[in-house]
Image (cartoon, coloured by chain):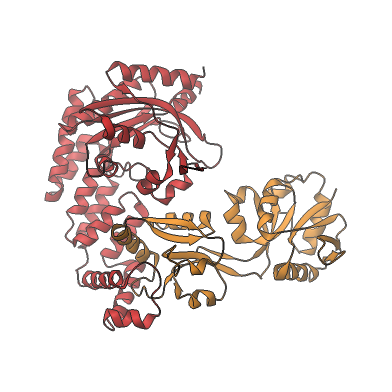
Chain colours: A orange, B red
Amino acid sequence: MAVKLGVPSKGRLMEQTFDWFAARDVRLTRTGAAREYAAEVEGVAGLELVLLSASEIPRELAAGRVHLGVTGSDLVREELADWSAQVVELALMGFGHADLIVAVPKAWVDVETLDDLDAVASRFRAAHGFRLRIATKYHRLVREYLRAHGVADYQLVDSQGATEGTVKNLTAEAIADITSTGETLRANHLKILADAPVHRSQATVFASRRADWNGKGPVLRAVLTKLDMAVPPELSQML
Amino acid sequence: MTREEALAAELLAEITAIGALPVAADILQPAETLLDLYGEDIRARAYVTDDPRMGEMMLRPDFTVPVVQAHMRDGAEPARYCYAGPIFRKQSGGRAREYLQVGFELFARDDPARADAEVFALFARLLQGRDLRPVTGDIGILKAAVAGLQTSDDRKAALMRHIWRPRRFRALLERMGGHGALAQARAELVAELRRAPAPALIAEAGQMVGLRSEVEIEARIGRLIADADTPPIPQDQVAALEALLALAAPAPQALAQLRAQDWPALAPALDRLDARLKALTEAGIDVARLPFEASYGRTTMEYYDGFVFGFLPARDDLPPVATGGRYDALTAVLGQGRAIPAVGGVIRPAILAQLEGA
């Protein structure tokens, strides 16, 4: 009757997740050889650790294959349509901060806000014969953001990496990407628009609304006690 | 056969009986055409798929585009077309993603008022006896109001471009009236742009990257400074436009109220509304009680630019049974230089079936 907790399998996000739980008296450790994805939990009986790629955790939560999962709030919003119907946000963890922002060339001295970007997109389309390209891998979040703000005459082009380079490479006019310090943006001659970011992301503990919670009440309560939390109403009815 | 299919067949037979030509359209449509028309937002509404040779394709989100294209290729004038078939739209929650649409489109150069009335009267007849509330509007009046503002052509064009995005439209109108956060941000930007000549500002900002050229940036700086020197749109005009957007009344009263505003720029559009009401009366519609809402049709995906109408169920948990309108500008875009005035509409038989069952 284990409750499965999905945690990023490598890097700083994994280390900080382990530290965060350890500070709450739940000790997560990797076991076995260095490259083996095996792990164990001390502190809560019946809690099972599953190491996964951070980008797969939203999907695993939505499918109900893990009950709890740690991942960036940006990934959940990007990967899951109508995300709040599929998962519950349990705790903001206070690390892994990154903003999803829209950036344009610094040389665009006439552009500071989305209002400007929208006006430029109209002229750009008239001058170049195609819609102004914004490179991103966050298609859902960026499209919803631009629609909510009424920006028109743009297109999203997919960029899974080195997104800041797309403008110089002439495959996009602007970008929408995650940044924490803005250094890579500046190095690539880009600046962030003055509007509120598309999303302010941080590492977050999510609970699945699709997992089988039947009989999992005692373990969940034990975990939440360590986190100093009550069972949220969305889950209590499923236990 | 489901009730939805039976209703679709009946409706199509009735439309065919008035001499409309049945047309077929592929379910797989090239994504590029639809993206260019509707913008990136259509991705959130239509199913996108990929063909190894044809590239990005969309499951038909409506019939209008393929029907206009077919007419532009080999249509005679005037032309009446009808169709019935499934369309596909992404939805949130439990709403239907795939449903039948039965439609009628009329392409005619002469007497637009009569064409509008013919389409509306046909839909009223097809839906007779069902508990539906008709609603009408006219995007042409909104366009005339924008065109008649005492302000620069650039500002009018910006407002015109966002007629179908009410939130953005309102924000622009506020900025152009000299109020609000956008006006403040714009004032700061222009103060910075006045600090030095454009080439110096650009050089100072850093390396040029990307396709948008210095010439384009300098041209916009020129426009921003010219715009800052343009007086704000007078407050009484902003108020008149907002009153117009909020107008909802039986059609003859709406017309009388608009006439009473004594707004010369609206006169031709109001004459068209007047002519349409007369044509509707001739077509047997009781216009005295016909609802008119000036903002109706602003949030639909379709780029209606004149007469718009809908038939709404009394239950507000259901979408409209029928919607339609005039889309002259769309035929110009799809016709690549050629254009034909067009008006049409669609019915969702599944909603009719649902209402019968209730």
Q: Position of residue B296 (x, y in %)?
A: 32, 41
Looking at the image, residue A147 sits to the left or right of residue A159; the answer is left
Q: Residue at x 33, y 45 (%)?
A: B298
Q: Position of residue B114 (x, y in %)?
A: 18, 29
Relative vertical location of residue B358 with respect to residue A115 in this rendering, above or below: above
Q: Which one is in front, B208 or B82?
A: B208
Residue extending farthest to the front is B53
Q: Which one is in front, B75 or B235?
A: B75
Can you tell which quarter of the image residue B83 is in?
top left
Looking at the image, residue B91 sits to the left or right of residue A26; the answer is left
Q: Residue at x 29, y 69 (%)?
A: B216
Can you tell which quarter of the image residue B328 is in?
top left
Residue B309 appears in view:
no
Relative vertical location of residue A200 with respect to residue B312 in this rendering, above or below: below
Q: Residue at x 60, y 53 (%)?
A: A79
Q: Residue at x 47, y 20 (%)?
A: B5
> How many numbered circles are shown?
0
Residue B346 appears in view:
yes
